[in-house]
Amino acid sequence: MKRSLKMQRILTLLVTAFILWGSTLPIHAENAQRTEPISAEKEESETVAVSDLGVEDGSLNLNCKSAILMEATTGAILYKQNADEALPPASVTKIMTLLLVMEAVDAGTVRLDDTVSISANAASMGGSQVYLKEGEQMKLEDLLKSVVIASANDAAVALAEYVAGSVSAFVEKMNTRAGQLGMTETVFENVTGLDDTAERHLTSAHDIAIMSKELIQHETILQYSSIWMDTIRDGAFGLTNTNRLVRFYPGCTGLKTGSTSKAGFCVSVTAERDDFSLICVIMGAESRDIRNAIASELLDWGFANYGIYTAQASALDPIPVVGGCENSCLISHGDFSVVLPKGKISTVEAQITLPEKLEAPIHIGDQVGTVGFLCNGELVGSISICAEQNVEKINFFEILRRITARFLLI
């Protein structure tokens, strides 16, 4: 009798295990979606196009050959005027020179405290300079500051030679990097922007904005470019920033000026107010004062009319899982930001779209849903909701093990 009862219990256990295992097989009807709002706060991801922002090309009629205004974190273009025409950039060229140097520093190829020996070639450069002498020894950081603050051509050449072995090798790297960044209207022939003998040393306002955005990811550059006055050679030689906006435009943090007879007066200006960062590029202005006035006008216009909507990265409630070793899965979304006209920012609503359940197996990083951001009912961006853990598909033996464990506790 006891043996019969024991066999019945075992049989019941096996039948139960089979039934439960069958219930974990894929249930393809689980496609119902649920949506719900989330709170807003921080930064990153999708942006809207120029046409979505409602800005007409050249509508401000700025007194220069070309111009562009870009939001610095998302790359959203707020305004452009003839921004894709290839033009001589003068010393704004040095943005790419500085970018390659900073990337070499980050890669550990060179260091800020390295001592650089100045070549005859570097010492022979004219135009803006810090009067380097052949054989002079100078710290790489001081050469970097000389380029950023004083636009020193001799320091730019010394850096190029030190990083790449020769100016020609460095220029090749400049053009390669420009291609990688999608700078379609750019050809570099030198590291300084001097164009007396250059045949096709050209770039566009749009391309300058692209490389400016990349450069300011290196915080060291903004530390230097926001300096009004500094010194090198143990205080014996003074540096004054060629960008007067650093001193006279509220919120200006840099970045690089340039002027030649071919290029006219050019600048790429970075500025920040209330955590809203802009890059303004002006090319082909008639004078330094006109260039600075145009840049100030365009920056003022950007700060007055636009802002940034941000949503902070967040963990969401776990979602139920069918057929998994776990009954639910942790999920989250990343940071999101989008540039919008100021009057529209308060109207943005965030909606979560998720299935009612997920089916195992699930892997970390799998997209399981989306967060859509609506402005007056129009989608202005979205971001993925992803799994934060692995959930393996459960098998018959795991179900049997669990039932057995419970059975033995009865």
Image (spheres, helix red, strand yellow):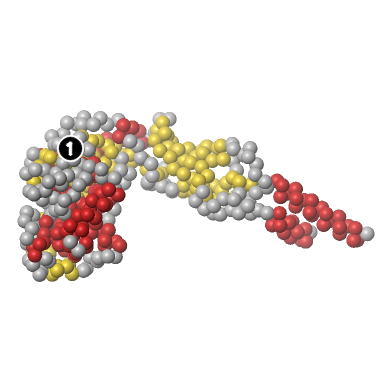
Q: Position of residue 105 (x, y in %)?
A: 26, 62
Q: Which residue is mark 1?
A: 66
Q: Residue at x 77, y 51 (%)?
A: 16
Q: How far from the left and from the top, in percent, is residue 181?
A: 29, 48
Q: Is residue 26 visible?
A: yes
Up-down relation of residue 262 to residue 125 (above or below): above
In percent of width and height, residue 1 lies at 93, 59
Which residue is rendered at x = 31% and y = 40% of the image? Answer: 76
Looking at the rendered structure, the number of numbered marks drawn on it comes to 1
Q: Is 58 situated left or right of 13 in this image? A: left
Residue 301 in view in this figure: no
Element marked by disc 1: strand
**Above or below for 169 versus 366:** below
Give 347 or 83, whichever is nearer the viewer. 83
Vertical relation: 65 (above or below) 144: above
Image point (14%, 59%), residue name: 157
Q: Quadrant of the C terminus?
A: bottom right
